[in-house]
Amino acid sequence: MLQSITIRQVALIDECTIEFHDGLQVLTGETGAGKSIVVDSVNLILGGRADRELIRTGCEKATVEAVFDVLGNETVQRFMEEEEIEYDGRTVTVYREIAQNGRNTCRVCGVPIPAAKLKGLASVLMDIHGQSEHQFLADPEMHLGFLDQTGDEEHRKQLEKIKTDYERFISNHRAYAKLVKQGERREERMASLEKDLEQLRTANLQPGETGKLQEEKKRLLSAEKEATMLRRIDECFSGENIDGSNSLSRIKNAATQLKDLAGQNTEIAGISERCSSLYFELEEIAYEISNMIDRTEADPVQLEKTENRLDLIRRLERKYGMDADEINRMQEKLEEEYDELNGLEERISEMAKEHKQLLAKYRSTAKALTESRKELARKFEKRMTAELKDLGMENTRFEVLFKPNESDRPQMPAATGDDRIEFMISPNPGEPLKPLAKIASGGELSRLMLAIKTLEATHTGVESMVFDEIDTGISGRMAQVVAEKMSAISGNHQVICVTHLPQIAAAADYQYLVRKTTAGGRTNTFVTELDNEGRKEEVARMISGADGVTTDAMEYAEGMLKAARDIKEI
């Protein structure tokens, strides 16, 4: 059960700690005092939506911390063991923090856990019934869940089984549908793959080939450039003129003529020697250049092949939008896809067999679940009729209608089975059964929901129940009936109730007054546990309403509280 809750900087509450007890306890106060803030805070602790609007104006964060007594709760014990959270075996502390920067913190006994995990723990700690659940009750799609909640352990096992069988089937179904879709375009896709693979196989791209080719091209271009320049230089020496001579032969001729003149002119002798020496030097240079031309690795044919190969790679890269190494990896995947498509018909056949088997297993489980639900529905109808009688709806007929499949096609499997149900009621004798959602009034919805929650309470392991204004649409004698019903529930569960009805307030074991005050320009909400005198005054206020607390109201309130105590002592 919930032992205490500490609320800090949530809406109008600056800081507040509420100590709770066993039995029925109510939160009362004037409209707008902030009773819903307490319920919102409990919702936060139970993993509810972390709305930053809840943070008190001017504050950076809001926090809620709750302490639960979980002695003997095996489900909580398993949760703590699975999450490897240490605790004393009796007390579990849950902490929730929401910040303006969007940060959302959840801790159990000081250990951080995701909000989704917190919801799992919360489902066995407390059950909150708010006004929004009236809307769920008015929605036929939600009725199946209400019925299943009242089932026993065996029924819950069947619910788990149908969920497992459904998940296995739907996983296969999706894979099977994907294969069938692939099969419809198999030939077209294989033809496309064959064309691409033939091109890639012919190209035979090698890992790192592009870099090697670029280096080879660079080397060949450099060699070609060098060879061209050397040939031009060689042409200067050995290239023939119009008269058939070349530069070297002319220099040689000049050296010969200078030598002839040297015998006649001593001044020319020196020039002759220099010219002869120059000729032999140039002849040696020309010879070396000729040898260098022969040694140069210029290979125009290889250069053309290299450029053509690079051009092919570039075309493939443009086509597939990736580099050559990525194309290689893609080719491997295309090969695998082709092999898969080649064996697709066999795989579809195998998957079809599995699909049929899983569907048959699901249908078998769904059929058994339907039988369980029909038996549960018969009990549920009887128990609801009895509960509604206690709640002043003794002439009401209640029935669970199992809706048939109106389509000619088989019903698609669902995680909850094949059943679609709707709650039907006839509030007045002689009137036919009609859908609850269409004819139930607000007060009737409140009593129907209370009846359902009463039945759920006997089948769930949740020790604490919170009712947020369960009294919507209820007044007069029915208010007393509802009060007695909630008091009865509190015999086995801790019940925390937000109410406007003095009858429910008087029936409580404990009462808390929620009030707001304004000081220093700020509004603050406070929650105070009332003593006997305080309870009498608050119940009197609830009786008096806008007229103010009268002496008659005080006397009547005292009588109501005494009558409630006398009933509990019986």
Image (cartoon, grey):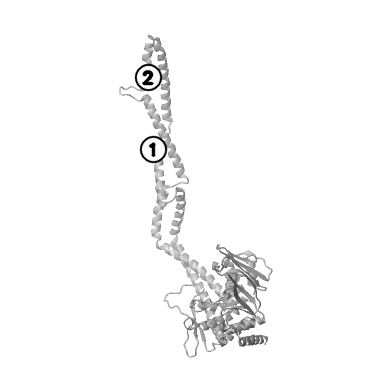
The answer to which of 80 and 528 lies nearer the viewer is 528
Would you say 443 lies left or right of 278 here? right
Query: Is residue 369 visible to the viewer in this orientation of the structure?
Result: no
Q: How crowded is mark 2: few (under 14 residues within 10 Å), some or many (20 or more)?
A: some
Q: Residue at x 37, y 19 (%)?
A: 251
Please, is residue 336 above or below residue 460 in the view?
above
Would you say 568 lies left or right of 431 here? right
Q: How many labels were placed on the picture?
A: 2
* Residue found farthest to the top: 264
**Label 2 residue SS:** helix
Image quarter of the C terminus = bottom right
Residue kind at label 2, given as amino acid type: Ile
Q: Are marks 2 and 1 in contact (CB under 8 Å)?
A: no
Q: Name the residue under label 1.
A: 301
Q: Name the residue under label 2.
A: 251
**Label 1 residue SS:** helix
In which image quadrant can residue 562 be found?
bottom right
Query: Is residue 265 visible to the viewer in this orientation of the structure?
Result: yes
Q: Position of residue 431 (x, y in %)?
A: 47, 89
Q: Residue at x 41, y 22 (%)?
A: 282
Q: How crowded is mark 1: few (under 14 residues within 10 Å), some or many (20 or more)?
A: few
The answer to which of 41 and 85 lies nearer the viewer is 41
The answer to which of 66 and 174 lies nearer the viewer is 66
Q: Residue at x 55, y 66 (%)?
A: 52
Would you say 345 lies left or right of 129 here? left
In which image quadrant can residue 94 be found?
bottom right
Residue kind at label 1, given as amino acid type: Val
